[in-house]
Image (cartoon, grey):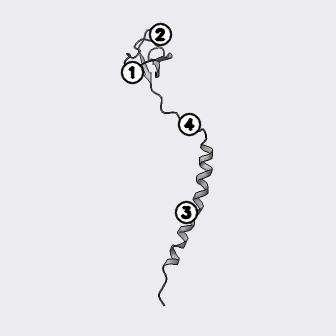
Amino acid sequence: MPVYEYECQSCHHRFEKKQGFHEKPVDKCPKCGGKPRRVIHSAPVIFKGSGFYITDSRKKAPDMGKSGGEKGKKKEKKP
Ligand SMILES: [Zn+2]
């Protein structure tokens, strides 16, 4: 069951509510009875384990640059 976060528009009280898809959204602030609006979170960025990935991709970079230098050798003049 997803947990939704609400923020009251009149007293800015924040609260969370576990709700199923077919349940009605909360329309009353538990503190003052005002109208709350649902707070939508942007997707959380997870940095766990990203350090390994970065060091791995770094190794490949220098090799790709080298191949560019051989381009000039291919053009040979006929004797
Ligand atoms: Zn309120």
Judged by depth in the image, the label closer to the viewer, 3 or 2, is 3
User: Which residue has dot 4 on it?
Assistant: 46
Q: Amino acid at mark 3?
A: Met
Judged by depth in the image, the label closer to the viewer, 1 or 4, is 1
* Residue at 47% in and 32% down: 42
Q: Is residue 61 above or below residue 37?
A: below
What is the C-alpha distance between the residues marked 3 and 2?
Answer: 60 Å
Q: Mark on residue 51?
A: none
What is the C-alpha distance between the residues marked 1 and 4?
Answer: 26 Å
* Residue at 62% in and 46% down: 52
* Residue at 60% in and 38% down: 48
Q: Secondary structure at mark 3?
A: helix
What is the C-alpha distance between the residues marked 1 and 3?
Answer: 50 Å
Q: Which of pointers 1 and 4 lies earlier in the amino acid sequence?
A: 1
Q: Mark on residue 64?
A: 3
Q: Position of residue 66 (x, y in %)?
A: 57, 67
Q: Position of residue 21 (x, y in %)?
A: 39, 21
Q: Which of pointers 3 and 2 lies earlier in the amino acid sequence?
A: 2
User: Which residue has dot 1 on it?
Assistant: 21
